[in-house]
Image: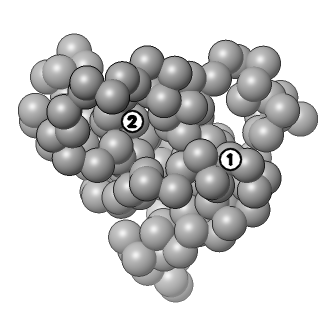
Amino acid sequence: MKRFSRPAPSLADIEALAARAHASLPEAVRKACADLVIRVEDFADDDMLAEMGIEDPWALTGLYDGIALTQKSSFDQPQGPDTVWLFRRPILEEWIQRGDVGLDALVRHVLVHEIAHHLGWSDEDILQVDDWRE
């Protein structure tokens, strides 16, 4: 069995990667996300999983919780800030299983995908910022 000499990346490590990924986004995207909160947890909580209809917590790497800007109305009463959740353990599991992508690139990909929900983007819009096919 192969042993690793370094501990797994921590919540703070994933937060730092997410912050760097966010800073690398085009200015217009960053401005549109000015009020968006980015949180990193080990796993989605039971309520999130139930709401998504997901039984396996390893299956969810990220989640957008809020109302897309394209659907927001001045009549909407906020229950809290729109939030992008990144789930460290499933992200690390995908990173290990894939073995062909850097952790920074995977965190960026998950972040962009969740930000896309906030912005109401199509798949084509996402590809303009994060062409995961490359």
Element type where label 2 sits in the image: strand
Q: Amino acid at mark 2?
A: Tyr
Residue 95 appears in the picture as rendered:
no
As displayed, is residue 40 above or below residue 111?
Answer: below
Is residue 47 shown left or right of residue 129?
left
Residue marked by disc 2: 64
Furthest residue in direction bottom, as rendered? 5
Give the percent coordinates (x, y) of residue 18: 55, 62
Residue 132 sits in quarter = top right
Q: Quadrant of the C terminus?
A: top right
Query: Does residue 102 sit above or below 67 in this rendering?
Result: below
Residue 82: which quarter of the image?
Answer: top left
- Amino acid at the residue labelled 1: Val
Q: Where does the image place residue 43, in percent across and percent down from the top left?
A: 26, 48
Give the x, y percent position of residue 68.
Answer: 44, 27
**Badge 2, how many Cα within 10 Å: few under 14, some, many 20+?**
many
Residue with the mark numbered 1: 29
Say which residue appears at 46% left-offset and 69% top-offset: 15
Of the pair 19 and 86, the residue shown nearer to us:
19
Instruction: Please say if the residues under marks 1 and 2 sit with CB atoms less than 8 Å apart.
Output: no
Tell me which residue sits at (57%, 68%) in the image: 19
Q: Where is residue 59 shown, x and y percent of the image?
A: 37, 30
Of 60 and 114, which appears nearest the observer? 114
Residue furthest out toward the front: 74
For residue 125, which quarter of the picture?
Answer: top right
